[in-house]
Image (spheres, rainbow, N blue to C red):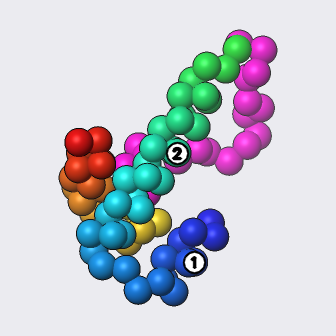
Amino acid sequence: MILSLDLRRWQLTVAQLAMVGARMREMYDVKAKERQKRKPADVVPANLPEQIKSGSRDQVAKIVGMSGKSIDHATKVAAN
């Protein structure tokens, strides 16, 4: 992901990284809801690699290089 490469170049504070993670989590959640709305005819072939089963919080936390708890906290702050 291009964003993960840019995060290493930018000199962001921990709080700024957490807010970036919160925004990324929103995007991941939207994509997950779109996948859940698939019709039965849209069945994925069995020969594809196994999909990541962890939640969007954990995926984003890994990309940003923080803990999932920090992403949760930043998501709550962004919501309020």
Q: Secondary structure at mark 2?
A: helix
Position of residue 2 relative to residue 54, above or below, is: below
**Residue 53 in view of the camera:** no
Residue at left offset 77%, top offset 32%: 45
Was residue 11 drawn as part of the magenta stretch in this picture?
Answer: no
- Label 2: how many Cα within 10 Å (few below 14, some 14–19, many 20+): few
Residue at left offset 47%, top offset 53%: 24
x then y, percent, for residue 11 = 41, 86
- Label 1: how many Cα within 10 Å (few below 14, some 14–19, many 20+): few
Where does label 1 land, which residue?
A: 5
Q: Which residues are magenta?
A: 40-60
Where does label 2 land, which residue?
A: 27
Quadrant where the N terminus lies? bottom right
CB contact under 8 Å: marks 1 and 2: no
Q: Is residue 63 left or right of residue 44?
A: left
Q: Secondary structure at mark 1?
A: helix
Residue at left offset 73%, top offset 43%: 48
Q: Image quadrant of residue 65?
A: bottom left
Residue at left offset 47%, top offset 83%: 10
Quadrant where the C terminus lies? top left
Position of residue 21 relative to residue 16, above or below, is: above
- Residue furthest out toward the top: 40
- State which tag comes first along the sequence, 1 or 2: 1
Q: Amino acid at mark 2?
A: Met
x then y, percent, for residue 18 = 32, 63
x then y, percent, for residue 57 = 37, 49
Between the residue at mark 1 and the residue at mark 2, the CA separation in whole angstroms equals 18 Å
x then y, percent, for residue 25 = 43, 48
Q: Amino acid at mark 1?
A: Leu
Q: Main secondary structure of the magenta part?
A: loop
Position of residue 44 relative to residue 79, above or below, is: above
Q: Nearer the viewer, residue 11 or 71?
A: 11
